[in-house]
Amino acid sequence: MDERKTALIFKAFCDENRIRVLNILKDGEKCACRLLEALNVTQPTLSHHMKILCDSGIVLGRKEGKWMYYSISEDGLSKAQEYIDFLRLKKEANNDE
Amino acid sequence: MDERKTALIFKAFCDENRIRVLNILKDGEKCACRLLEALNVTQPTLSHHMKILCDSGIVLGRKEGKWMYYSISEDGLSKAQEYIDFLRLKKEANNDE
DNA sequence: AATACATATCGATAATTATCTATGCGAGGT
DNA sequence: ACCTCGCATAGATAATTATCGATATGTATT
């Protein structure tokens, strides 16, 4: 339960532009250039967000020739889901002790 | 699918101190003073984080006399989970439309 | 009503993050 | 070998967020 690591995973989801990217990648793997068209930011800014998404483990990058293809990582989603499930495993409240 | 709203939900999870709070609240409702002991930040800083957690919908606050009691919101967790599930509903990849 | 206590809010500052322009790098194509 | 294209990196700046000390607010308690 490294708090830093957990926070890192969810950095993927806490920015509006990154959510926009994820919503697009939901339909399947996309080239960076496609994301750039959709996003109204400059190319370096997109690159910055894609790095954060990859570092979080939620997105996978694949290089093919000149192009970068990004897709959502099922494993990454599982990690995120695991933490949410972890929070659900309540014992009885133990307020006073 | 308001990107701003989705990002807001996950703001709860993208900070180390807030994850620490959630990990504690996992065991059940806790008073703010308990969180303060555990967290190594000043009282105003804790209050700031608790506001973000409540605004995200992941945490519920309840005032009882002088004390504030915080707990994890099942509904909030569901909202977060819904988005993760949403990303999982893949159609076939459609790279080159 | 005076005091003590728990928490929220205010205002300032430090730290982090997002964004841009400019530039570098690798992969094809000519 | 050179050029072009797609993307990453560097460096600077703007915007946001985290944090603190000081103070306000509301709630017992005496």
Image (cartoon, coloured by chain):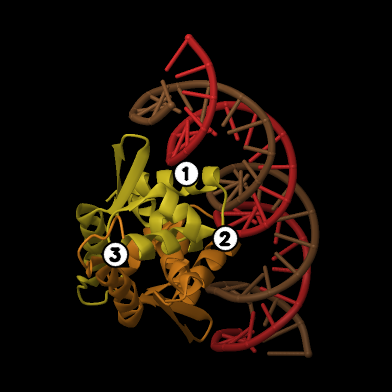
Chain colours: A yellow, B orange, C brown, D red
Image location of residue D21, percent across then percent down: 71, 54
Q: Chain of mark 2?
A: B
Decide: few, some or many residues near mark 1? Use Cα within 10 Å; few <14, some 14-19, many ≥20. Answer: some
Q: Is residue B42 visible?
A: no
Q: Is residue B85 left or right of residue B46?
A: left
* Residue B10 found in image quarter: bottom left
Alpha-carbon span between mark 1 and mark 3? 20 Å
Q: Nearer the viewer, mark 2 or mark 3?
A: 3
Q: Position of residue A55 (x, y in %)?
A: 36, 44
Q: Position of residue B6 (x, y in %)?
A: 43, 71
Asked if the residue under mark 2 is in contact with the one under mark 1, i.e. CB atoms within 8 Å, the reply is no
Residue at 29% over, 55% down:
B95
The quadrant of the rendering that contains the N terminus of chain B is bottom left
Three-letter residue code for mark 2: Thr
Tag shown at residue A27: 3
Q: Is residue A16 left or right of residue D15?
A: left
Task: Give the residue number, with chain letter if any, for mark 2.
Answer: B45
Q: Earlier in the sequence, mark 1 or mark 3?
A: 3
Q: Secondary structure at mark 2?
A: helix
The image shows residue A32, relative to residue B54, as above or below, that is: above
Residue A47's mark? 1
Marks 1/2 same chain: no
Q: Residue at x 26, y 77 (%)?
A: A93
The amino acid type, in three-letter code, at marker 1 is Ser
Local packing at callout 3 (Cα closer than 10 Å; few below 14, some 14-19, many 20+) is some
Answer yes or no: are tags 2 and 3 on the same subunit: no
Residue A21: image quadrant is bottom left
Residue at x 36% of width, y 40% of height? A67
Task: Pick the residue in front: D20 or A79.
Answer: A79
